[in-house]
């Protein structure tokens, strides 16, 4: 596996909203992590040197995606106001909604700091893996 | 260790309570909302009866003196940690020296702050709960004060040590949502199921009708010992004089003024007033979340239905247990 392929994989990972990929073959393991808050990819391999590649950041629109499947709840059932609405300013890693899986409430977490421009998912929607919940205008430089 | 930073009183260390000592005249004590206490312990991977802090007066502030996995259950206290809002029925991790602030809930009365490993105060008569009347158990047998340091037991939780990145935590469906009861008329009225008790038949027919069909206001003279209610006067067919006898949390007594009292977790274990009914065990947690000034409605039930209600609570907690274990397997970051 060469560097281009690794980069292609990491691009796909980011595009799908997945956080980690592990590929194993006898004697070889490749793990790719996508760091959600720093916008940095870390590629680790047992036979390739660890390398870090910083992607230049810019003010842009970012989709916040699901990392697990579930029923979308914009508001906690014990509360009246939603976690965020259009125009809300959110911090990186803050909770923007919930995915209900049986009696579990899994948080949907903002991948960057920014302002909510569009909430795409509706209350009660059954969302799959990697689906867009909302769009943020990123406040990165 | 946890340091209590707030001056607001009445918070106490509570576990499930000491149910086996009533016969010796020792009251139950224990969490007023037992379902919330156990749900918190499930989130924390504690034993069901691990002790937590029961908070009733807000704002309430604590500082975690070491990295701690904690859970918030019971009423929604709009909790905040370093500017981040923490939802109710939620488990999270705090870093050393982080401060958690609980604010007055919009509805509900009691918040449980549990920690992985439990609040590790000494066990007295089989329980860590605070016996306020007897001044033993809990933290020095009293409610918590500013500056109190509470020890945390050794945690079974796998995420409790040395995790570099703090996740957002996760939550569970609250019993208020999963175990609804009565009309959805808002938080100002709580429905509880009641079994007729020994002296039920000695009340006038009209009083019994009013007992089931009208609102009972929880007066300000209501606390962990019991709730004094205000409403229509309940009139017995004839005056009753009873000898003192054993009573349990949930018993609804009627003193001479005809205004009922519900005995609760810190009630003394005996009393002599006539008993018109008993709030079923499965609904005592609802009373724990009903606040003074709000209203109660009594719903007549049968022994069989009371047992079914207990099973429903047990099934709810088992569901939580099963799904939190599964969710952890999925690599939940807390």
Image (spheres, coloured by chain):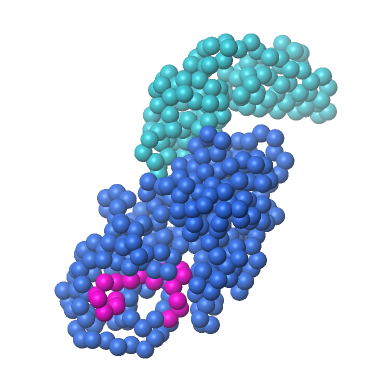
Q: Residue at x 27, y 53 (%)?
A: B183
Colour used to depict chain A in the structure image? cyan
Q: Residue at x 53, y 70 (%)?
A: B131
Q: Position of residue B45 (x, y in %)?
A: 61, 52
Based on the displayed image, in which of its 4 quarters is residue B203 positioned? bottom left
Q: Position of residue B207 (x, y in %)?
A: 19, 74
The stretch in magenta equals B254-270
Quarter of the N terminus of chain A within the rendering: top right
Q: Is residue B304 visible?
A: no
**In the shown orientation, is residue B227 left or right of residue A103?**
left
Q: Position of residue A46 (x, y in %)?
A: 81, 25
Magenta stretch: dominant secondary structure: loop
Q: Residue at x 73, y 26 (%)?
A: A31
**In the shown orientation, is residue A62 left or right of residue B185?**
right
Q: Residue at x 31, y 62 (%)?
A: B218
Q: Is residue B161 visible?
A: yes
In depth, the one of A38 and B134 nearer the eye is B134
Based on the displayed image, in which of its 4 quarters is residue A125 positioned? top left
Q: Position of residue B127 (x, y in %)?
A: 59, 68
Colour used to depict chain B in the structure image? blue
């Amino acid at each position: 596996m060469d560097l281009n392929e690794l980069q292609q994989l990491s691009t796909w990972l980011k595009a799908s909203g997945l956080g980690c990929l592990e590929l194993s073959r006898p004697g070889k393991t490749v793990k790719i992590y996508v760091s959600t808050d720093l916008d940095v990819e870390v590629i680790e391999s047992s036979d390739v040197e660890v390398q870090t590649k910083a992607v230049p950041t810019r003010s842009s629109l970012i989709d916040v995606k699901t990392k697990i499947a579930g029923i979308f709840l914009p508001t906690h059932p014990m509360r009246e106001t939603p976690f965020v609405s259009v125009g809300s300013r959110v911090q990186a890693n803050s909770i923007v909604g919930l995915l209900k899986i049986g009696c579990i409430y899994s948080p949907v977490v903002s991948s960057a700091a920014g302002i909510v421009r569009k909430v795409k998912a509706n209350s009660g929607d059954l969302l799959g893996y990697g689906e867009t919940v909302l769009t943020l205008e990123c406040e990165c430089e | 260790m946890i340091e209590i930073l707030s001056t607001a009183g009445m918070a106490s260390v509570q576990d499930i309570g000491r149910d086996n000592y009533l016969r010796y005249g020792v009251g139950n004590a224990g969490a007023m909302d037992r379902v919330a206490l156990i749900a918190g312990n499930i989130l924390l991977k504690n034993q069901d009866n691990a002790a937590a802090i029961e908070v009733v007066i807000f704002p309430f502030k604590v500082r975690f003196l070491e990295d701690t996995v904690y859970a918030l259950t019971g009423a929604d206290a709009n909790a905040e940690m370093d500017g981040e809002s923490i939802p109710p029925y939620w488990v999270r991790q705090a870093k050393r020296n982080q401060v958690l602030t609980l604010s007055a809930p919009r509805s509900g009365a009691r918040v449980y702050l549990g920690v992985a490993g439990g609040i590790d105060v000494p066990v007295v008569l089989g329980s860590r709960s605070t016996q306020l009347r007897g001044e033993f158990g809990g933290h020095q047998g009293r409610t918590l004060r500013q500056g109190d340091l509470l020890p945390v037991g050794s945690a079974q939780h796998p995420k409790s040590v040395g995790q570099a990145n703090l996740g957002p935590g996760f939550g569970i469906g609250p019993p208020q949502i999963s175990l609804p009861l009565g009309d959805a008329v808002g938080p100002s009225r709580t429905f509880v199921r009641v079994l007729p008790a020994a002296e039920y038949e000695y009340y006038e027919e009209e009083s019994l009708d009013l007992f089931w069909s009208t609102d009972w206001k929880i007066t300000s003279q209501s606390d962990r010992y019991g709730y004094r209610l205000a409403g229509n006067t309940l009139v017995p067919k004839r005056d009753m004089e009873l000898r003192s006898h054993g009573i349990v949390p949930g018993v609804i007594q009627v003193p001479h003024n005809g205004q009922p009292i519900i005995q609760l977790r810190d009630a003394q274990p005996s009393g002599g007033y006539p008993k018109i009914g008993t709030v079923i065990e499965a609904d005592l947690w609802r009373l724990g979340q009903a606040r003074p000034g709000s209203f109660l409605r009594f719903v007549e039930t049968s022994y069989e239905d009371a047992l079914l209600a207990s099973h429903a609570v047990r099934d709810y907690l088992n569901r939580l247990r099963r799904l939190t274990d599964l969710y952890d397997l999925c690599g939940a970051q807390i």
